[in-house]
Image (cartoon, rainbow, N blue to C red):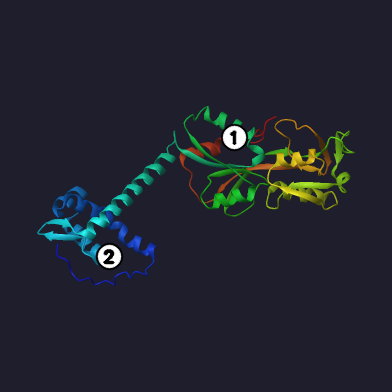
Amino acid sequence: MAHQQSSQTRLSPSSDIEDMALLLAPRLAYFAGVARTEHVTRAARELDVPQSTLSRAMVRLEQDLGVDLFARHGRSVSLTTAGRTFLASVERALAEVARAAEEVRADADPATGKVAFGFLHTMGAETVPGLLHAFRADHPRVRFSLVQNYGEAMLEGLRAGELDLCLTSPVPDAPDLVARRLDEQKLRLVVPADHRLAARRRVRLAEAAEETFVTLEPGYGLRRITDDLCREAGFKPRIAFEGEEAETLRGLVAAGLGVALLPPPTVPRPGVVELTVTAPRAVREIGVAWPADRPDTPPVAAFKKFLLSRRGNLLPA
């Protein structure tokens, strides 16, 4: 395998790393095979490629790198110092590629694959554990990567490929996502136990127009719903505190720092009273969303089908 002068323009040190990787990657397994056997003919036989193809690939690889990787002795070869240095990194790279390939195959396995599933913080204590328990009755070995976050962050996670699907509210309407409404959850006006409205069971939201509110931060779906409901009731809420978690807001209400529109708690919270809102209709829709153009692995398809089968029966009674 004679080392010929390159007819190509060599990559300079300032060339883009990604371009270099794309150029070299197809030849790395060939290089490792020749380095392992130290014989071009044997390597070609093991790799199941024509000897001429293998020889040309090694010449091009050396030309692109601008260094001699092999000392040639007829059809036998031995690694140069540069070749040994390069081989160590190539073997690590090939092992990492093999590991990644095995990982994605395992994640797609129908029986033992993985689902990256996002959901709202308020659904983490009861709703999601119940769903996973029911799903795993028929799919006991499917694995889950669980992410709790607010709605907009989860939608970005879908778009970035970090999540396969998510439960969120409001149900998104975006061309790059598919979303299906699954259920709705009543929201309550939560007031301190000694509040002027605490003796009531039902209240119109307009009756809280002069109250101080504690809410989730902008960007959270429940914050948007709170703002919309207050607007529908004829007022803009005066907000004293903004948080990231519904139960923290309940704690603020219990401390007398304001009132809040919240979904029902998992367990009753001392120090607060939860009032049914009669007008406007105070609910939040819960839906499942996933990327519009991404094919599902078998475990993701199975879990999606399961969630859609729970339409109207998603939330605990």
- For image coordinates 69% across by 48% down, the residue present is 221
* 25 up-or-down from 148: above or below: below
Asked whether the viewer can see residue 284, the reply is yes
Report the residue marked by disc 2: 65
In the image, is 307 to the left or to the right of 1? right
**Residue 35 spot, x, y in % from top left:** 20, 53
Viewed as shown, does residue 130 lie left or right of 48? right
Single out the mark in the foreground, 1 or 2.
2
> What is the three-letter code of the residue carrying label 1?
Ser
The answer to which quarter of the image holds residue 286 is top right
Q: Nearer the viewer, residue 95 or 137?
A: 95
Residue occupied by mark 1: 309
Q: What amino acid does circle 2 point to?
A: Leu
Q: Is residue 48 visible?
A: no
Residue 155 in percent (x, y) is at: 59, 50
Name the residue: 65% across, 37% down.
Answer: 123
Q: In this view, does 300 lie to the left or right of 168?
A: left
In percent of width and height, residue 258 lies at 81, 44
Mark 1 or mark 2, earlier in chain: 2
SS of the residue at dot 1? helix
Q: Where is residue 85 in the image (x, y as percent from the top left)?
A: 26, 57
Horizontally, residue 89 falls left or right of residue 118, namely: left
Quadrant of the rendering where the C terminus is positioned: top right
Q: Residues within 10 Å of mark 2 (few under 14, many from 20)?
A: some
Q: Residue at x 64, y 48 (%)?
A: 151
**Disc number at residue 221?**
none
Quarter of the picture holding the N terminus: bottom left
> How many residues crowd around disc 1 within 10 Å: few (fewer than 14), some, or many (20 or more)?
few
**Cα separation between marks 1 and 2:** 57 Å
